[in-house]
Amino acid sequence: MLARRVLIGVPYLWLLVLFLVPFGIVLKIALSDYALSIPPYTPTMDFSQGWSGVKRFFAALDLENFWFLSEDDLYWKAYLSSLRIALISTFLTLLAGFPIAYAMARAPQEWRPALMMLVILPFWTSFLIRVYAWMGILSNEGFLNQALMGLGVIGTPLTLLNTDIAVYIGIVYTYLPFMILPVYATLERMDESLLEAAEDLGCSRLSAFWSVTFPLARPGMVAGCFLVFIPALGEFVIPSLLGGSGTLMIGKVLWEEFFANRDWPVASAVAIVLLLLLIVPIILFQRNEQKQREANR
Amino acid sequence: MKTRIMLSAVLAMAAGTAGAEEVRVFNWSDYIDESLLEKFEAETGVDLIYDVFDSNEVLETKLLAGGSGYDVVVPSASFMERQIAAGAFQALDFSQLSNAGNLWDMVKQRVEIYDPGNQYAVNYMWGTTGIGVNVGMVREVLGEDAPIDSWELVFDPANMEKLAGCGVHMLDAPTEMIPAALAYLGENPDAQDTDTIEKAEPVLAAIRPYIAKFHSSEYINALANGDICVAIGWSGDVLQARDRAAEADNGVEIAFHAPKEGAQMWFDMMAIPIDAPNPDGAHKFLNFIMEAENMAAASNYVYYANGNKAAQAFLEPDVIGDPAIYPTDEVLDKLFTVRAWEPKVQRSATRMWTRIKSGT
């Protein structure tokens, strides 16, 4: 009995240590005030004063920083702009990733491990170096412009680097494996006799794809979209290296709160709001999925 | 190496004493002649662990989070002022700094506004924020009498409209650009009130459409390659671009000017964190750097002026004799220093900067 409880307790312990405790710390900083000290916020927990210290600590926490966020339209604009960039790039990643995953799942059995390897291979080099490589490709004197000009497609170099287009390219490139792998996993497990059955019943290959393969791949696509959308929303490195001065994203705003304003409490409040904005739609979506699954049963 | 660590660990445990003495230094990237690091180890027998950073913000976050583990850090003076107030540093023990007499009074006096009594830090290098130009390209666009030694060059929209064609970069730092715009307007560049600071906004917003990029390091390469014709940047960086262009022999001639209306003078200061594991070792390192020959070797290598008077005797003629590195007295009088802003003022300046850059 005890052994079983321990076994069940382990995942909850990890959840507590790796998610709830850090979240609690960030939430606490978000409720604190800026201070010129080490660490740069107040109050800090002082156990030496016993119970009265703890009471004073909780009394000093307030929601002021969250009200502040609602006063300035910068934060909303940055959230919306991040949301737009994340949605568009998730869609583009799906568009690019699905055919690759489909081709992999349809490839001969003996090729699949090698193809899988090729998808994972870029992870073996540093993410930062790969983003820098894109700077080399997209710059005015970069490979892409030189190639296009060499072929006579364009007369003057295209401005790609430091634009939103470069940000989309960077995000799609970086997160493509996160889309391919779950989609591939669902497609590979698919029972091919279903397709044969569809064709026997008079479906064309195209309509068999739309009425059989596509719906069955949906869980993989949903998982892939979440894996891309969530990190893309808070992305900082890609917009700061590939994006222009006008690219407004919440990751950059967060950086400025933290480093330029040195305001850890406001930075933490921005992070908490971002988390809430992400968690609420995900929970609603999963509820909906659950209901549908139960209805289908 | 591994056996040495193991052995010293065992010995340390057995004898109950610490292993080989270590000192950890955190300095800006590309900011020292690295042979000095070996020289320090050879002279003192102390193991030197030398790490680098590339922004004041990164250093400050480490210091304010506490427990950085470094013995010597090198913040810029205006950042250091705030860090001193936060209690991040320990007062220097001048009895351990026999070379302190080598320091330059002019620099000591100027950094006193950040560190009253020069208690917490000694100056390492200093420089100015000014305008780097590709002389040929700018003259071609604006004519022979282009005002390359004036803020007019970059803050007068009429000039910028023409220069936009050949490319203008600007530092992505409100703490540099706002004081520069105020100097151009004839306002106090060290203004601490939001009302004065906001006067810089229309100046910067008016030239925003002509700026190709806001970035604090890319201009070195861009100037050297001839991709851009003007950059507002730091003296040493522009000089680095000048030397790269000269080495490449690509016909690009770069010049740096601290504008005549006044330019910001900044200082990078060596200080010892309050929780430094080895403050004695830190003092040894500071004393080593303050030795005239060592400090001169560092400046000869990085092309920045230093705050060491005695070191000037050992400087190469192309360092001490270059007015872009060691400005003439006349220019020196015009240089201004800028103090750290209050949190509220800083916030409104950051916000203003975002508004200028992104229009939001």
Image (cartoon, coloured by chain):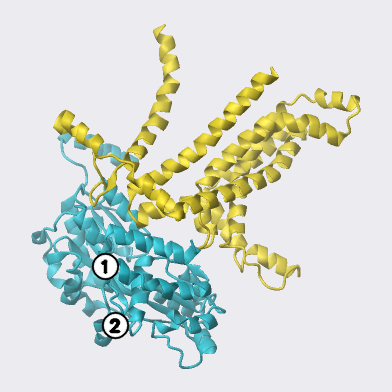
Chain colours: A yellow, B cyan
Q: Is residue B254 left or right of residue A80?
A: left
The residue under the point 36% across, 39% down is A26
The dot on residue B327 is: 2
The residue under the point 55% across, 43% down is A124
Q: Quadrant of residue B3?
A: top left
Would you say the residues marked 2 and 1 are in contact, meaning their CB atoms lie under 8 Å apart? no
Would you name the residue on which mark 1 appears?
B192
Q: Quadrant of residue B332?
A: bottom left
Tell me how many marks there are. Answer: 2
Amino acid carrying label 2: it is Pro
Considering only vertical position in the picture, is A15 above or below A279? above
Question: Do discs 2 and 1 share a chain?
Answer: yes
**Nearer to us: label 2 or label 1:** 1
Q: Which subunit holds the residue at mark 1?
A: B
Q: Which subunit holds the residue at mark 2?
A: B
Considering only vertical position in the picture, is A93 above or below B14? below
Residue B152 visible? The answer is yes
The residue under the point 57% across, 79% down is B165
